[in-house]
């Protein structure tokens, strides 16, 4: 195949065994968000070995490697996530997780190894003019690793013109990429609504203020938001995933708790959802003589691919894999990514990397049978290298 003969890919393939071993070692020793001490130490030691200036402890367990060449003020940021998930692995692989109820079920072990492979190649073989910032982020899985790194000065200390990331995609063939211009992924908010009433005997409800009735009314009223408050051409999701109240049939409890997942594809819609959820929760509770408090936590923003960054990403894909290896997605993905905080802070682009189809690489992420497909490693590294060489092109 002509793709295999790509000189850059061939170079990366020649040295990929070492990075496959690193990936599998990280897979066997997974660490949850903000606890990636062992993984961060591996990353820091390898970057130092390759010749990077290494900063550790940014955002807790985050690591940044910087390599500057030439005199240009141009800079590029490349990001990989490092955390695992609280899932019991059932793959039975020789390098399966050795940690109870913790596994790399989303491929962040692969993303880390991909960026290390790119780091090695760029340090040893690439000619560029400018600054390369490699961002190894902790706690992507809903714990706010990106925001913590940003709040601790990531982009002030390591300014970049653009920032890029990738994520493996089960069901997409190896050597294939996918992206879209504009919104790539949805925002994600988690909401807890606590309805406080007055407890009482189930046989004498007139002496109580029933929070279950009030909360039930809130659940029904929330269903009107997407159908009546959001423009029909815009996507939004309001899901009540948990309703917790009471312990027995003849006691009216003091409180009821609702837990929601809320998603949108643009900031205006997201803000409308928050406003209406608050108004409905408080108003419906008040109508039943109860009180509602709303805890609204923003996990990620809409992930928007900057047009110029996306065009650069496409150029790099075509250089590595050819024009037929790119899918331009017609619709945004309703899943979310906290890389969105980085693309909100500066221009950037997020790309899906084929993890394979069928029995090899096709198992969906967040599944106890999932494993990152090592055949994808050099493809991802080649894309990162091609991006860097284009943006930091030497004169």
Image: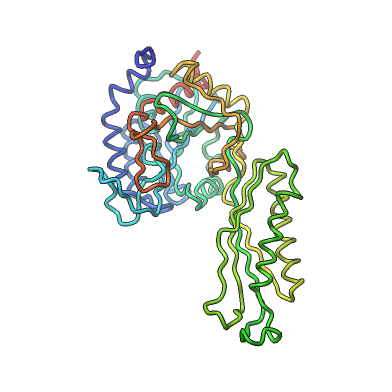
Is there any visible trace of residue 264 in the rendered image? yes
Report x, y in % for residue 325: 47, 20
Q: Residue at x 46, y 38 (%)?
A: 135
Image color mode: rainbow
Q: Residue at x 52, y 37 (%)?
A: 158
Q: Is residue 109 above or below residue 284?
A: above
Closer to us: 209 or 338? 209
Q: Is residue 204 above or below residue 326?
A: below
Q: Is residue 308 above or below residue 38?
A: above
Is there any visible trace of residue 156 in the rendered image? no
Residue 312 sits in quarter: top right
Q: Residue at x 56, y 58 (%)?
A: 241
Closer to us: 237 or 340? 237
Relative side of 128 to 283, left or right? left
In the rendered view of the protein, which quadrant contains the N terminus? top left
Report x, y in % for residue 2: 38, 12
Q: Residue at x 57, y 66 (%)?
A: 243
Closer to us: 363 or 19? 363
Relative side of 98 to 354, left or right? left
Residue 382 sits in quarter: top left
Relative side of 259 to 134, left or right? right
Report x, y in % for residue 169: 45, 34
Report x, y in % for residue 84: 39, 48
């Amino acid at each position: 195949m002509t793709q295999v003969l790509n000189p850059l890919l061939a170079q990366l393939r020649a040295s990929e065994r070492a990075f496959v071993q690193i990936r599998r070692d990280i897979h066997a020793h997974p660490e949850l968000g903000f606890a990636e001490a062992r993984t961060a130490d591996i990353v820091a030691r390898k970057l130092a070995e390759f010749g990077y200036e290494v900063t550790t402890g940014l955002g807790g367990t985050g690591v940044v490697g910087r390599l500057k060449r030439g005199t240009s003020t141009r800079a590029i940021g490349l990001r990989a996530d490092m955390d695992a998930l609280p899932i019991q692995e059932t793959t039975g692989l020789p390098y399966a997780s050795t940690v109870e109820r913790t596994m790399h079920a989303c491929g962040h072990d692969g993303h880390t190894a991909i960026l290390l492979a790119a780091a090695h190649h760029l340090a040893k073989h690439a000619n560029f003019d400018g600054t390369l910032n490699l961002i190894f982020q902790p706690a992507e899985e809903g714990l706010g690793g990106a925001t913590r790194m940003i709040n601790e000065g990531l982009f002030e200390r390591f300014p970049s013109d653009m920032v890029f990331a990738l994520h493996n995609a089960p069901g997409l063939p190896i050597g294939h990429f996918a992206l879209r211009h504009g919104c790539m992924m949805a925002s994600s908010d988690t909401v807890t609504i606590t309805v406080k009433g007055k407890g009482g005997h189930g046989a004498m409800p007139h002496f109580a203020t029933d929070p279950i009735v009030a909360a039930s009314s809130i659940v029904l009223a929330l269903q009107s938001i997407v159908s009546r408050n959001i423009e029909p051409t815009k996507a939004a999701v309001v899901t009540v995933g948990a309703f917790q109240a009471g312990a027995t049939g003849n006691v009216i409890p003091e409180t009821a708790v609702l837990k929601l997942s809320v998603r949108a594809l643009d900031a205006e819609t997201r803000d409308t959802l928050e406003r209406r959820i608050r108004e409905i929760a408080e108003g419906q509770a008040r109508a039943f003589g109860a009180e509602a408090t709303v805890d609204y936590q923003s996990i990620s923003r809409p992930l928007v691919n900057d047009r110029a960054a996306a065009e650069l990403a496409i150029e790099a894909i075509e250089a590595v894999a050819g024009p037929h290896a790119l899918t331009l997605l017609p619709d945004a993905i309703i899943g979310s990514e906290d890389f969105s905080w980085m693309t909100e802070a500066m221009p950037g682009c997020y790309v899906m990397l084929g993890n394979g189809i069928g029995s090899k690489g096709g198992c969906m992420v967040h599944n106890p049978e999932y494993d990152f497909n090592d055949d994808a490693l050099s493809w991802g590294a080649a894309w990162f290298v091609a991006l860097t060489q284009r943006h930091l092109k030497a004169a």
